[in-house]
Image (cartoon, rainbow, N blue to C red):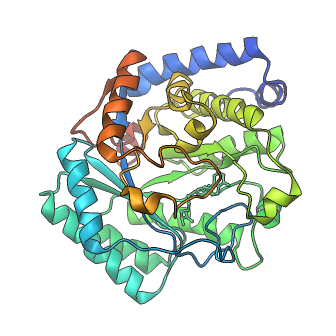
Amino acid sequence: MMNKQEMIDILSSLEPKAMNSIFKRAYALKLKYVGNTVYFRGIIEFSNLCSNDCYYCGIRSSNDRVRRFTMTEQEILAAARFADQAGYASLVLQAGERDDPEFIDFIEGLIIGIKNESSNRLGITLSLGEQRYETFSRWFKAGAHRYLLRIETSNPDLYKKLHPRNQDYYSRRDCLNNLKNIGYQVGTGVMIGLPFQTAADLVEDIIFFKKQDIDMIGMGPYIGHHATPLYKVEQPDNQRNFLLSLAMIALTRINLLDVNIAATTALQALDDYGREKGIKAGANIIMPNITPLQYRDGYQLYDNKPCLDENADQCQACLTKRIIAIGEQVGFNQWGDSPHFLSRVK
Ligand code: SAH
């Protein structure tokens, strides 16, 4: 691990020279540990029904100005077919939080359906929030092999400030442990630049990733959503949070080495070249949005989410060009599993 104080200093000052030096170091380590390949995961944001009420999120249950939607199984299968034909090789199924029996069955059927239709070509990552052990286990048996569950912040006191009382930090952390025991490749992450969050908190986040022996990281800037309670507390400094996020990607690469790290959509929301800059800071995964256009405005977790009007084909062409332009190649037709996971289970 890099020295803690040194990391705190970089994150608090965001001094350009220090930043460039960690970007260079992190990118060299990216090349060494995960190569010059960027892997795509087609993400389908298939429902904004949510029983949680996170103070920062645009689709929180108390936001009654959102038109709620759930895609049908047929629509999701069609999006999966697109990903398969485009050579994306891996899907992320994301939605708001639900744990009712119909939902659990629906997801199980969906996983089996996607696996069958693609003759097991598509890898499936789930991002469906906290669930019971048994549910995680059923979905794993059905064929999902990766799970993303952001801890949001590793500081339990800060977690409390951002969530209502029934959403508990320790339950969320237990879920991460359960996912690992079941055999998933486990991803977590945090939001960067939250109100009340300090540079020391962010360094602790990286230490948390390391202690949890995490395989994949998905983190990005906190971005305000006008209809949320947190937005009323303080409006975020987007420029600062963008740089902080790049620094966090670099420091995570430097400290964790062989994990998969995503350059998230939120990065691109704040900068036209956000994802490329994320790759140059050490990330190696991009998640093109393949949700049908008519549903995109229903899934706005934060304001000004990008690519609301660009369909999946256009998105693929645009992204591929962008990756090649920065001297990387796209890992078409490969799952691109986390090397950390592969050595962890060996
Ligand atoms: N229901 C799933 C998926 C949640 S949405 C779950 O609970 O894990 C995916 C992620 O979007 C969240 O984990 C959160 O980190 C992020 N997010 C939500 N609101 C955001 C905001 N205002 N700015 C940036 N990221 C946000």
Q: Residue at x 24, y 39 (%)?
A: 334
Residue 59 falls in which quadrant of the image? bottom right
Q: Is residue 206 above or below residue 101?
A: above
Q: List x then y, in percent, for residue 283.
A: 50, 31
User: Relative to residue 245, is residue 95 drawn left or right?
Assistant: left
Q: Residue at x 50, y 51 (%)?
A: 187
Q: Is residue 104 above or below residue 263?
A: below
Q: Residue at x 43, y 20 (%)?
A: 31
- Viewer can see residue 35: no
- Viewer can see residue 18: yes
Quadrant where the N terminus sits is top right
Q: List x then y, in percent, for residue 319.
A: 38, 32
Residue 238 falls in which quadrant of the image? top right
Q: List x then y, in percent, for residue 222.
A: 70, 48
Is 156 or 288 nearer to us in this picture?
288
Quadrant where the C terminus sits is top left
Q: List x then y, in percent, for residue 74.
A: 24, 71
The quadrant of the rendered image in which ligand 1 is seen is bottom right
Count of numbered circles on the image: 0
Q: Is residue 215 above or below residue 108?
A: above
Residue 35 falls in which quadrant of the image? top left
User: Relative to residue 123, is residue 226 drawn left or right?
Assistant: right
Is 71 or 2 nearer to us in this picture?
71
Q: Residue at x 37, y 31 (%)?
A: 318
User: Relative to residue 280, is residue 13 drawn left or right?
Assistant: right
